[in-house]
Amino acid sequence: MSKTVNVSDGASYAPQSISKPVVKPGEFCFAVAYMDHGHIFGQTNGLLEAGGTLLAAYEPSAEKRADFVARYGEMEFADEFSQLLDDPRIQLIASAAIPNRRSDIGLQVMAAGKDYFTDKSPFTTPAQLEAVREACQTSGQKYWVYYAERLHNEAAWHAGELIKDGAIGKVLHVTNLAPHRLSKASRPDWFFDKQQYGGIITDIGSHQVEQFLAYSGCTSAKVTHARVANLNNPDRPDLEDFGEFTIVGDSGAAFYSRVDWFTPEGSPVWGDGRSFIIGSKGTLEVRKYCDAGRNAPASLIVKTDNNSSEIIDCSNKIAYPFFGQLILDCLNRTEQAMSQTHIFLAAELSMQAQALAEQLAREENNT
């Protein structure tokens, strides 16, 4: 497997770590299908490092197949997706299809008696969410989502561990800033078609909501404000290049997030993503991808409490525990890595924020 990680291109950013297998070879077998987004490489890396065995793949595009083989070596490619569904050896299928196709693929996977691991956003409409929620209940299969900005980021993950340990007390407020590099010339056509990507808050925002729920411990929340816009790309009218929204959770914790496609070309990383977490006994600033102006890539936390302030360097310290937990949950039918309720709530709230932003935009245009 290639050890080169491109930190300047978010579309192909695929973190890697040391292997920490939780199973022996052949005990957990998975396949990969529909490689429309480069996040499939991150999903595959995480499963392999946790001990998963990659048995087969399916991808209609010869170019994408070649790229996958270049990273992971020669492997069995199915001629039809149905061959993966019918293979009794395969326990899970990982996919990074075009967003509006992800839920339908997941329904097929679960109907075949397998678990599913999709890139975010997992849905582009509430109807898709409801169909998958019902299918999970009736089939007993799992519908995992690659919320990578926490699950595949060392500082973001460790921030959650510090919060669980009570390092900053009760979480009162979370701010997430999530700029991304547009890389307009290299994006596929579907990236600019809102019917296919679902809107900027549905897409990037689902990452952010998931982090808020994880850090605050909220199990329900209400969207209080949202805005989306195309501020600087008139040649791509269906692109939303800016979004922001606020949420208040059932614990009283509040959340603000800004998502955008305005990472400057001078940035050494694809996005200077940050979280600012206020607790009753301290604060955390999470610098996920760089320490701007000083070091890139970087993954660190600035922790301040009533006794001291310190910088915690998380780089190359954590082997992304989520993927091992996912595998064990699939084998044991448990929910240690992440509950299905949590997965669905993150997506549901992001779609609610997207809908509110669109509603407010229509009202403003009609005045």
Image (tube, helix red, strand yellow):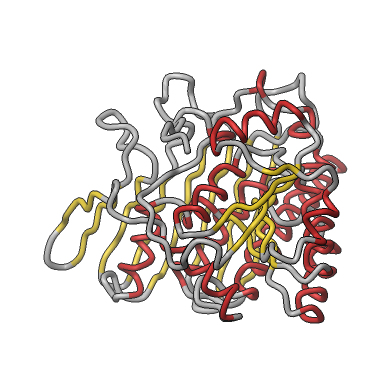
User: Hey, which quadrant is residue 105 in on the image?
Assistant: bottom right
Q: Position of residue 230 (x, y in %)?
A: 70, 31
Residue drawn 62% across the image and 44% down it: 40
Question: Taking 255 as reference, is 285 above or below it?
Answer: above
User: Hey, which quadrant is residue 27 in on the image?
Assistant: bottom right
Q: Position of residue 189 (x, y in %)?
A: 79, 28
Q: Decide if residue 27 is on the left or right side of residue 145.
A: left
Question: Taking 151 as reference, is 187 above or below it?
Answer: above
Front residue of 323/86: it is 86
Residue drawn 63% across the image and 67% down it: 343
Count the numbered circles shown.
0
Question: Taking 273 as reference, is 159 above or below it?
Answer: below
Front residue of 235/326: it is 326
Residue drawn 48% across the image and 69% down it: 325
Residue drawn 56% across the image and 68% down it: 248
Q: Position of residue 288 (x, y in %)?
A: 39, 46
Residue sticking out furthest to the left = 307
Q: Decide if residue 293 is on the left or right side of residue 209.
A: left
Front residue of 170/294: it is 294
- If the image is split into quadrants, where does the C terminus sit? top right
